């Protein structure tokens, strides 16, 4: 191959080659991976070493990427600092991930260009035919979006995935990595204290999952919980949360029988009787006193399948576990269900609590929810308490329990005991 011509950016050639490869993948029933590789900090390299060295570096990078290819694969330069690789004849997505790993491995050692050692950083975005798209344009678009995300997050690669996070923006997270993290105990569980408003004593702790991915860095819980729900990982994740939290808090719960541990439970757990049973078994193994355990279920989750939820909640409640309705106020029409549901507590959504000071409407909602809950003999918890003024206002309103950054942020287990000692009760 003529190196000079191959280094001319050529997106059109990529798309026409990609079309041919897609046809043959279709005929042979194989997968195809499109990987866009982005060389980071090209401008800085240009400034520091000059254009000539930078050009040689790009040529060397091209050669190294080309050397990773198998017969039938191809590589095209598609931009100043971007190359596209098409890997054909794959049997599974895993091979695309392995290839992306190998590509990133090129950053491990500095490249020697005209006697200069240059450390490079790469980002890669992967899309797979037919999993992510059936035609070349869309496949390209997805790999391009994935590499954009990979560039924003530290160094690393991203596999395109059509998961959406709460903000409505598309997030590209590797399911395989989350799965691996769940199975191999790489998820962490943090604890956020809650206090009684009447005397400011500790009421308990909410368990909140944390995940730092090797390639994406810290991933927001909302994002990876969504991903776990979309990929069937939420059941093993919940089992881990219960097992680890109850094991870590065994001593704390034994010392003070007034403390409780609150765990978040997704809709899917309630909608599937087998998973509910699995969760109940896990609880029975690890929990000595079920009345110290609170399961937080969002209003929306209950309303997504009220009949199934009612059934599962009934079983859990009968075993002595407390049930809390999370994010209350954000769902809809649950008032009529409040009567029917075996519920002990309502957690007022933080969106109302956060704005209580400035927004009279929010304050009115908070007060109404507290009164409503008390009419049904339910405990009230306000989350998102960020200052003293709100804490005091909630107390005046008759709210029972408060949780929020003003009291404490979610903390790892080893900080919990010192925090409890410091709080005093
Ligand atoms: P959530 O159950 O509503 O949890 C409360 C969220 O509010 C937590 O966010 C917490 O860090 C945050 N928060 C607490 N106090 C304050 C405050 O004063 N101000 C503000 N602005 N925020 C506060 P986090 O940890 O990011 O969790 C987000 C959501 O992810 C949780 O919302 C929950 O729905 C879900 N989640 C977390 N861990 C798990 C888990 O183990 N299982 C399941 N199913 N869901 C989980
Ligand atoms: Ca919660
Ligand atoms: Ca909540």
Image (cartoon, rainbow, N blue to C red):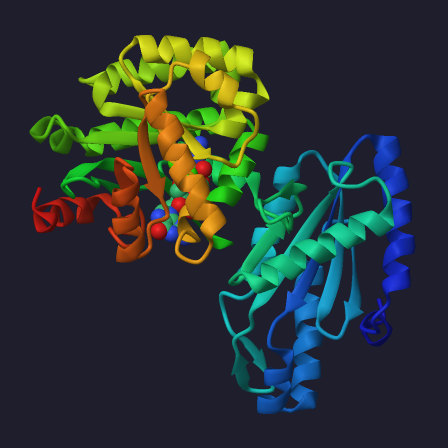
Which residue is more in the foreground, 248 or 110?
248
At x 55%, y 87%, the residue is 115
At x 27%, y 32%, the residue is 245
Residue 374 seen: yes
Residue 50 in the image: x percent, y percent?
A: 64, 91
Residue 400 in the image: x percent, y percent?
A: 26, 35
Q: Is residue 211 left or right of residue 165?
A: left
Q: Is residue 174 left or right of residue 6?
A: left
Residue 132 in the image: x percent, y percent?
A: 74, 40
Residue 226 in the image: x percent, y percent?
A: 54, 37
Q: Is residue 394 left or right of residue 22?
A: left
Which residue is more in the foreground, 47 or 279?
279
Position of 349 relative to 145 (above/below): above
Position of 7 relative to 336 (above/below): below
At x 60%, y 58%, the residue is 150
Which residue is more in the foreground, 31 or 188?
188
Image quadrant of ligand 2 equals top left
Q: Quadrant of residue 287?
A: top left
Q: Quadrant of residue 131?
A: top right
Residue 220 seen: no
């Amino acid at each position: 191959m003529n190196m000079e011509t191959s280094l001319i950016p050529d997106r059109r050639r990529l798309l026409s080659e990609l079309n041919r490869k897609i046809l043959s993948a279709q005929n042979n029933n194989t997968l195809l991976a499109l990987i866009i590789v982005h060389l980071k900090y090209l401008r800085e390299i240009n400034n520091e070493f000059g254009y000539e060295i930078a050009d040689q570096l790009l040529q060397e990078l091209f050669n190294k990427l080309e050397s990773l290819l198998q017969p039938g694969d191809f590589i095209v330069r598609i931009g100043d600092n971007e190359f596209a690789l098409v890997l054909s004849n794959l049997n599974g997505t895993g091979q695309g991930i392995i290839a992306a790993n190998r590509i990133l491995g090129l950053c491990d050692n500095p490249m020697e260009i005209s006697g200069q050692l240059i450390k490079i950083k790469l980002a890669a975005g992967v899309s797979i035919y037919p999993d992510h798209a059936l035609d070349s344009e869309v496949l390209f678009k997805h790999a391009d979006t994935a590499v954009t995300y990979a560039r924003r997050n530290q160094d690393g690669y991203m596999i395109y995935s059509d998961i959406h996070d709460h903000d409505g923006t598309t997030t590209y997270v590797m399911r395989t990595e989350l799965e691996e993290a769940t199975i191999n105990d790489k998820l962490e569980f943090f604890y956020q204290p809650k206090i009684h408003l009447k005397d400011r004593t500790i009421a308990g702790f909410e368990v909140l999952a944390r995940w730092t991915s090797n390639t994406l860095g810290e991933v927001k819980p909302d994002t990876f919980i969504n991903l776990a729900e979309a990929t069937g990982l939420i059941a093993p994740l919940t089992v881990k949360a219960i097992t680890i939290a109850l094991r870590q808090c065994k001593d704390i719960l034994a010392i003070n029988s007034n403390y409780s541990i609150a765990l978040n439970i997704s809709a899917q757990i309630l909608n599937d009787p087998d998973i509910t049973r699995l969760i109940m078994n896990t609880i029975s193994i690890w929990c000595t006193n079920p009345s110290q355990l609170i399961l937080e279920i969002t209003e929306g989750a209950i309303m997504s399948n009220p009949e199934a939820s009612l059934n599962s909640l009934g079983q859990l409640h009968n075993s002595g576990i407390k049930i809390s309705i999370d994010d209350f106020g954000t769902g809809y029409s649950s008032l009529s269900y409040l009567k029917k549901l075996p519920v002990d507590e309502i957690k007022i959504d933080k969106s109302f609590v956060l704005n209580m000071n400035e927004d009279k409407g929010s304050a009115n909602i908070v007060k109404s929810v507290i009164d409503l809950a008390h009419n049904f003999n339910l405990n009230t918890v306000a989350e998102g308490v960020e200052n003293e003024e709100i804490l005091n206002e909630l107390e005046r309103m008759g709210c029972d329990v408060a949780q929020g950054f003003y009291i404490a942020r979610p903390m790892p287990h080893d900080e919990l005991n010192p925090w409890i000692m410091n709080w005093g009760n």
